[in-house]
Image: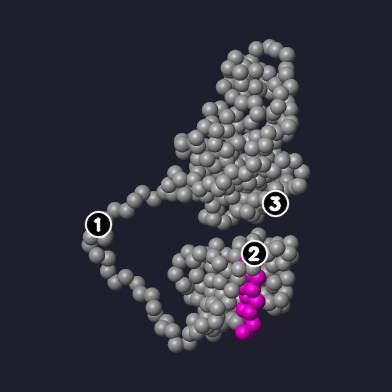
Amino acid sequence: MTAGATQRWSYAPGAGLLLGTGDRWLLVADQPEECVIRDLWEALTGLGLDQALAVVERAYAGRPPSVAAWDVGRCQVRGGGAVAHGAGPELTVGLDLDGPWLPLAGGIVAGAAVRLEPADAPVGRRRLIDGIPEEVAASVGPDVPTGLRRRPDQPAAEPPEEGAEHDGRTTHRQSATVVRTSRVDHLRQPTSETVLAVFCAHGHPTPAYSGTCRVCRGEVASQQPQRIPRPRLGGLRLPSGEVVALDRSVVIGRRPAPVDDQGEWPHLVSVPPEASYVSRVHVHLEIDGWLVVARDLGSRGGTTLLVPGRAPEAIRAQEPHVLEPGHALDLADEFLVVYEVGDDPSRSGDAT
């Protein structure tokens, strides 16, 4: 917060980014990386509104989210941004308001709107509760849900129906409901890569160099390896209980996108808004033959590799780590994913 401002501004909390002080404010319908926020603050407070908008354009490669800006009576908007003029200017960018209007002298907050309060607006509009009625104090509310994270030793939620494809978008809910969008054809395209495999007594394919089945852990008899289309290598269990099939690469983040323009379209997993320290494009899991290789993409919150029986290990940016079944990735201490094989919705071991 900044001190010394005489204007009485208020903001509504939300999923966007609000920066400003005095008569200069910038509202963005996104929460960019920390380095971008720092550049925005320095440009807005030290150079001016035009320079701050140039930072936004550069950070989003010419395709910025909705923006609304105000500077001593001069306003600028981008996309769905708007500046309404009533008793005082009100900046919005099309986001839902997550709470009541709160006073703000200046600084950087997570907001969805900001407005200048009229000079004659009452100051003490919000009152503290003088007393709690006895019937309210004696009541008991519902159990508080656990957080986003699920430890590997906790039971997983009921998996999706057999044959359901993960569409790459998941939202954390307090109930077991998972919001899905329509399926996309490119997520059902088969992989073209082949691998050398042997088969256990139950018919599960496993790497030719392994004497134990990777799915059922049964013994694999000596046999001539066969080249087959690479099967699904298991699944990536999310905190919601949903499982992403490891039949192609996976990108996880607040706003995931393919990390390059080569190969198949990856599964894109969007973390819920509560995981605010997870980066827009946080971690990439790549399928290489029989291997699942994870890379942190230079995230601000970091990624921790959790291996049973070993101390947690922080993954350095862009450093590849081969995951084994049972390993977990903790994204920014807010979003835990676990690599699983066996009897799961990803049908690990089935040739595709």
Name the secondary structure under disc 3: loop
Q: Position of residue 196 (x, y in %)?
A: 73, 23
Residue that label 1 marks: 138
Which residue lies at the image location 58% right of the left edge and 69% below the top edge? 93
Name the secondary structure under disc 1: loop
Q: Are marks 3 and 2 in contact (CB under 8 Å)?
A: no
Distance between the alpha carbons at the discs numbered 2 and 1: 47 Å
Task: State the image quarter where residue 36 is shown.
Answer: bottom right
Distance between the alpha carbons at the discs numbered 3 and 2: 22 Å
**Along the line of sight, which residue is nearer the eye, 57 or 46?**
57
Q: Which secondary structure dominates the residues rendered in magenta?
A: strand
Q: Is residue 279 above or below residue 97?
A: above
**Magenta stretch bounds:** 66-78
User: Given the image, on which type of amino acid does mark 2 rest?
Assistant: Pro
Question: Counting other residues with Cα less than 10 Å from the Cα at mark 1, is it few (<14), some (14-19), or many (20 or more)?
Answer: few
Question: Counting other residues with Cα less than 10 Å from the Cα at mark 2, is it few (<14), some (14-19), or many (20 or more)?
Answer: some
Q: Position of residue 257 (x, y in %)?
A: 67, 50
Q: Are marks 2 and 1 in contact (CB under 8 Å)?
A: no
Q: Is residue 300 magenta?
A: no
**Along the line of sight, which residue is nearer the eye, 157 or 279?**
157
Q: Is residue 70 magenta?
A: yes
Q: Position of residue 324 (x, y in %)?
A: 63, 32
